[in-house]
Image (cartoon, grey):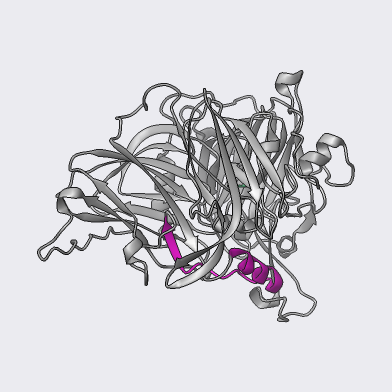
């Protein structure tokens, strides 16, 4: 195994998109940031130097960080922010993970531009599928006409919905269908007949996406750095936080074909960016048309933005390659409602009450709207026994029973605020059902758990019914993931063994919901002896 050393200098860099320059936050001046390529079993040592004027942290999304929460990165959860002029070195090892993950800022909305791919190659030799001739990362993102943090501030001030993006991007480029963007459209050159691997990441701030390639099938082989039972598809749906690796064979007549992504939007009555980003799959033998001009590429047909059936059917096809060991003797049976809410305003329709009917948007899990600490991190407070930073009374179920498909009790529209954690004993088997509340609107919530991957054992629409739905769980070959969508107006069930001690954030990976409180954290206690306990914090952990 190797150790990879990197320096990440966080800095403002002018970047021109859609005819305009923006001074965006970058790592080493690159957008997207540097690609990290390692092998399973390797270690990474990444020194982050904050040369900007704002706090930052970096999160290694999907890396299990076994007993090592100090390297996880969410601000005020496992560390305090790296202040301007300060540095922090993240040190971690990849243990039994292969495939595609990614890294991103985990400080307010800086991840809107601060992200990159983390490729984990197999420890020895080859993939459990046909060896591709070439590999390409496809990082899908969103481009805003303002600094993402300015949009966050505007949303937080007004209490309304944040501004939507003005473009989607592939590897930072909007592509042919946007103004001033054609020249820099990402091109993927292929030889006829060859097989390529696309490592697709959804790094968008607030948007689930459909992705397709004109005239080509994709074979899904991996998701969230876990291999899957291969299956072919014309379209994939990918939520922020998720990764999907697909094999594509260049088996079509030599020409130019668009790869394209557009919104999968489930919130009713909500504004969204309905543009389409493209890159070009370019057969080398078809580079030119009649007058030496490149041929016009062919556009794929993408599903309609509200095509929940296609999105859900795709996700349901993702399975583990063979039988896996799903926890069966459940120690903790948890039921978490996830959804938006509305806070009443004392002065409705004032500049600070621009939510529906003069309210302010909020969001919650089990009616608790999570409040991040401001002066300490949860993990440091826990490790050092600092009282008063959090409590451990996060409820295992919502406060009252209600019908999630319709008429939700008005009292549940205004969640309570709190910094509440849920304590888990080391090694306990957890079953967790997420239920969309349908308060304000039905919406897909991509839920991400730090420090773990989990098995997705079931999913459905309407109210989760323990009596009938549990019996239908897939305990044979469910997929292993770190981010899974709660279907709009429905539920999804996951299982995992709490074998990674530390404080681990669980949240909706739509940042618009994360900042409104759609998050909580698990406190997984140490087990017996050092091999089941959190390692000591590094000396350079940023002071709070
Ligand atoms: Cu990809 Cu908490 O994040």
Q: Is residue 99 left or right of residue 234?
A: right
Q: Is residue 75 above or below residue 457?
A: below
Q: How many marks?
A: 0
Residue 178 left/right relative to 7? left
What residue sits 21% from the left and 55% below the top?
256
Residue 108 visible in rendering: yes
Q: Does the magenta-highlighted stretch encompass residue 158? A: yes
Residues 473 and 72: in front is 72
Residue 280: in magenta span: no
| Relative image position of residue 125 (x, y in whole percent) | 38, 22
Please provide the residue range marked out in magenta: 148-170
**Which x, y percent locates residue 51?**
65, 54
Does residue 305 sit above or below 344 in this rendering? Answer: above
Please name whichever residue, 329 or 319, is drawn nearer the observer in this view of the structure. Answer: 319
**In this view of the protein, which residue sits in the foreground, 348 or 68?**
68
Q: Image height check: is 349 above or below 194?
A: below
> Is 116 in front, or is 502?
116
- Can see residue 462? no
Q: Is residue 444 above or below residue 335?
A: below
Most extreme residue toward the right is 387
Q: Residue at x 76, y 74 (%)?
A: 345
Q: Position of residue 240 (x, y in %)?
A: 52, 51
């Amino acid at each position: 195994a190797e150790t990879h050393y990197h320096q990440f200098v966080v800095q403002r860099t002018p970047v021109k998109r859609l005819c305009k320059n923006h001074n965006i936050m970058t790592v080493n001046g690159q957008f997207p940031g540097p690609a990290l390529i390692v092998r399973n079993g390797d270690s990474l040592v990444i020194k982050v130097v904050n040369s900007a004027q704002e706090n930052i942290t970096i999160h290694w999304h999907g890396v299990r960080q076994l007993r090592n929460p100090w390297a996880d990165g969410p601000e005020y959860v496992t560390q305090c922010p790296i202040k301007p002029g300060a540095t922090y070195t993240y040190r971690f090892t990849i243990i039994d993970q292969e495939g595609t993950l990614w890294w991103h800022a985990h400080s307010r909305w800086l991840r809107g531009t601060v992200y990159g791919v983390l490729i984990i190659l197999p420890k020895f030799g080859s993939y459990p599928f046909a060896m591709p001739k070439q590999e390409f990362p496809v990082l899908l993102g969103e481009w805003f006409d303002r600094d993402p943090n300015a949009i966050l501030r505007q949303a937080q001030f007004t209490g309304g919905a944040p501004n939507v993006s003005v473009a989607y991007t592939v590897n930072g480029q909007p592509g042919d269908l946007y103004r001033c963007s054609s020249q820099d459209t990402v091109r993927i050159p292929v030889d006829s007949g060859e097989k390529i691997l696309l490592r697709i990441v959804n790094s968008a701030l607030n948007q689930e996406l459909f992705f397709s390639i004109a005239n080509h099938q994709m074979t899904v082989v991996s998701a969230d750095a876990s291999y899957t039972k291969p299956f072919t598809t014309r379209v994939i749906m990918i939520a922020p936080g998720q990764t999907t690796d697909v094999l594509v064979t260049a088996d079509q007549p030599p020409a130019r074909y668009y790869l394209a992504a557009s919104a999968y939007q489930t919130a009713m009555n909500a504004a969204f960016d309905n543009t389409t980003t493209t890159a070009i799959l370019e057969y080398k033998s078809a580079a030119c048309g009649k007058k030496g001009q490149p041929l016009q590429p062919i556009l794929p047909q993408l599903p309609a933005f509200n095509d929940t059936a296609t999105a859900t059917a795709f996700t349901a096809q993702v399975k583990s390659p063979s039988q896996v060991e799903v926890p069966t003797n459940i120690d903790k049976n948890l039921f978490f409602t996830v959804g938006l809410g509305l806070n009443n305003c004392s002065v409705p329709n004032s500049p600070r009450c621009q939510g529906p009917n003069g309210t302010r948007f909020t969001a919650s899990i089990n009616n608790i709207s999570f409040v991040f600490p401001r002066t300490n991190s949860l993990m440091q407070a826990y490790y050092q026994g600092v009282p008063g930073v959090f409590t451990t009374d996060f409820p295992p179920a919502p406060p009252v029973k209600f019908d999630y498909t319709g008429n939700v009790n008005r009292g549940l529209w205004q969640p309570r605020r709190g910094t509440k954690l849920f304590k888990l004993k080391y090694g306990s088997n957890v079953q967790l059902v997420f239920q969309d509340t349908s308060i304000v609107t039905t919406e897909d919530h991509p839920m991400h758990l730090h420090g773990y991957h989990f098995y997705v054992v079931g999913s459905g629409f309407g109210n989760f019914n323990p009596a009938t739905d549990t019996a239908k769980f897939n305990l044979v070959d469910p997929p292993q993931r770190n981010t899974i969508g709660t279907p709009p107006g429905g539920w999804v069930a996951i299982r995992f063994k709490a074998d990674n001690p530390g404080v681990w954030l669980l949240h909706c990976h739509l940042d618009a919901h994360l900042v409104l409180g759609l998050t909580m954290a698990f406190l997984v206690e140490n087990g017996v002896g050092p091999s089941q306990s959190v390692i000591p914090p590094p000396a350079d952990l940023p002071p709070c």
